[in-house]
Image (tube, rainbow, N blue to C red):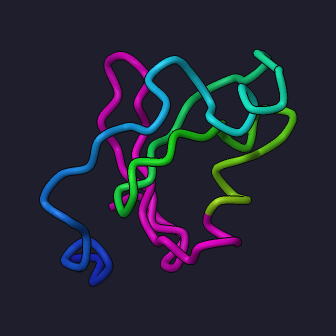
């Protein structure tokens, strides 16, 4: 079964913070575990293994459904609405 939210995404997005979690960097912090990028707007945020969990906070604030890992060697996507890898 295909996630219906993937079809609502733009063809491409540009990361808003290629140097790390945009929210952590705005706080002057550099302590994140893994990075995710919102496929709706390009916001780069830290994962749930990170102290601040900014990727979850971004979904809660925006309802943008799909994030993708931007870790080297990873290409999976996560749909927050469906709660699964897509």
Return the residue nearer the eye: 38 or 85. Answer: 38
**Which residue occupies the extreme bottom position in the image?**
4
> In the visual, does 70 lie left or right of 45?
left
Q: Residue sitting at 82 percent across and 21 percent down?
A: 28
> In the visual, does 56 lie left or right of 15?
right
**Residue 46 picture quarter:** top right
Q: Residue sitting at 32 percent across and 79 percent down?
A: 5
- Part of the protein shown in magenta: 59-86
Q: Residue sitting at 43 percent across and 37 percent down?
A: 69
Return the residue nearer the eye: 73 or 61. Answer: 61
* Quarter in which the N terminus is drawn: bottom left
Image spot of residue 78 (x, y percent): 45, 57
Image spot of residue 64 (x, y percent): 48, 71
Image spot of residue 86 (x, y percent): 32, 61
**Residue 79 picture quarter:** bottom left
The answer to whether residue 26 is above or below residue 37 is above
**Which residue occupies the extreme left position in the image?**
11
The answer to whether residue 49 is above or below residue 76 is above
**Residue 48 picture quarter:** top right
Image spot of residue 50 (x, y percent): 77, 32
Q: Residue sitting at 13 percent across and 59 percent down?
A: 11
- Does residue 73 show up magenta in the picture? yes
């Amino acid at each position: 079964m295909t996630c219906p939210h993937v079809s609502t995404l733009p063809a491409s997005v540009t990361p808003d913070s290629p140097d790390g979690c945009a929210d952590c960097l705005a706080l002057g912090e550099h302590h994140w575990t893994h990075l995710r990028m919102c496929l709706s707007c390009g916001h780069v945020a830290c994962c749930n293994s990170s102290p601040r969990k900014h990727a979850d906070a971004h979904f809660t604030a925006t309802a943008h459904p799909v994030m993708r890992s931007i870790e080297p060697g990873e290409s999976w996507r996560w749909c927050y609405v469906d709660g699964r890898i897509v």
